[in-house]
Image (tube, rainbow, N blue to C red):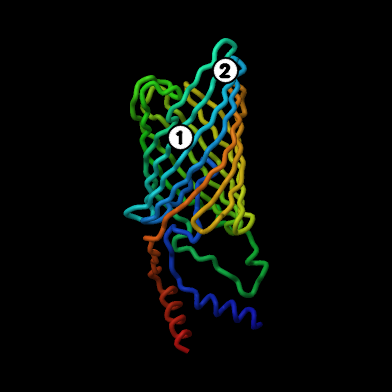
Amino acid sequence: MSPFKIAVFIALILTPVIHYGQHTDEINSNRPGKSMSAYAVGKSVFQVESGIYGIQESHDLLNYDANGFGVDMSIRYGAFHEKLEFVADLQYQYEDVVTRTVTTTKSALKQTTIGAKFLVYDPFKGYEKKINVFSWKANRRFNWHQLIPAVSVYAGVNATFSNNPYHFSPESGFSPKAMLITQNHLGDGRWVLVTNIIADYIMSDYPSYGYVLTLTRGFNRKWSGFIENQGYKSDFYSDAIVRGGAAYLLSNRMQIDASISSSLKTTPSILYGGIGFSWRYDANYKDVIINLDNNDSKKATRRAKKTKKG
C-alpha cells in the first residue's frame, strides 16, 4: 500500500464518528433570496437579516406608474431544540402612485408574519460518505445520496392591520400561513437547491398559493451567487418573479448582499433591486454532539483511543 493510501486510512480511523447540530462555523442567511432554508440557526442563536430596496412598477391596463422603496427584516431565533427555529418577518413599503390625473401615496407594513420552523428529516444525520482508498475514480462517481433532501415544515400567522393598501380587505385580522421546505446539497455542497411550497392567508377571502425555487452556488469561502424563481396565485393577485444576486461574507457572523428582481408579466410589471446585511449572535451556543451508537462506531472510537495512546 502506498504512503498516500496509508495516510488516508489512518485519517479515517482517527475521525470521530459523531453528528453535529445545525449551527455552522459561518453565518447561513436566507438573504438575498426569498426562500426559507430547511435548517435552523441553532439552539440559542439569534440572527437578524435585513435590507432596503427600491421598486418601480407599471401597469399597462390600469395606466399607472409607481416608484418607491421598502425595508424588510427577518428575525430568527433557535430555542428549545436544535431543529426548532422561531421567525418574525416584517416588511414596510412606501410608494408614489402616478396616474394620468392624480398622484397618490401609499405606505404600510406590507408583511407582518410570526411563525416557527421545524426540521423533520436530515439526510446527513448518521450519514458518513465512504471513501475508497484504492480507487480515485470510485470517489469521483455521482453521489446519489445528495438527491435526498432535508425536509422542514413551517407554520405561522399573518397579522393584517386596518386600511392597509397592500391587502384586499380594509379590516384588520389574522390568517394562517404554512410551508413545506426541502433543501439539497449538490456537488459536495457547492450547489444548494431550496424549494418552498407555500399556502398563505389561509381561511381568508383570498388565500394565496405559491412556490420559491432557489439555486445557490458557492464560488469560494467569501463569495456566493444565486438565481431564483418565485410564483404565487390567488383571486386577488398572481405573478411570477425571477431574481438573481450575490452575497459576500464579511466575517463568520456578518454577510452583505445585493440582488435584482423582475416580474414576468406586465399587469403590473415590477422591477426592484436592493442591498442587505445579515448578522448573528451565537456566543451562547454550545455544540451538540451525538455519538452514533453502533458496533462500527464503537470499534472506530476504540481504535482511535489506542492510536492516540501509542
In the picture of the structure, the residue carrying the numbered disc 2 is: 98
- Is the residue marked by circle 1 packed among few (<14), some (14-19), or many (20+) residues within 10 Å? some
Residue 74 falls left or right of residue 276: left
Q: Nearer the viewer, residue 105 or 186?
A: 105
Q: Secondary structure at mark 1?
A: strand
Residue 130: image quadrant is bottom right
Circle 2 residues within 10 Å: few <14, some 14–19, many ≥20? some
Which corner quadrant holds the N terminus?
bottom right
- The nearer-to-camera label among 1 and 2 is 2
- Which of the pair 270/18 is nearer the observer? 270
Looking at the image, is 171 positioned above or below residue 120? above
Cα–Cα span, label 1 and label 2:
22 Å
Q: Residue furthest top?
A: 101
> Between residues 281 and 14, which one lies in front from this camera angle?
281
Q: Residue at 48% x, 47% y: name it.
A: 37
Q: What secondary structure is found at the residue carrying circle 2?
A: strand
Number of the label disc, if any, that sits on residue 91 = 1
Nearer to the camera, 69 or 307: 69
Up-down: is 207 above or below 288? above
Q: Position of residue 68 (x, y in %)?
A: 55, 28
Residue located at (38% from left, 33% from top)? 158
Residue at 47% x, 89% y: name it.
310
Q: Mark number for residue 168?
A: none
Q: Is residue 21 left or right of residue 263?
A: left
**Residue 217: percent from the left, percent from the top?**
61, 51
Q: Check the image and name the residue furthest to the left.
A: 80
Q: Please, what is the three-letter code of the amino acid marked with disc 2?
A: Val
Can you say whether 150 is above or below 305 in the image? above
Measuring 64% from the left and 83% from the top, which residue is drawn there? 3
Q: Amino acid at mark 1?
A: Gln
Q: Position of residue 259 (x, y in %)?
A: 60, 41
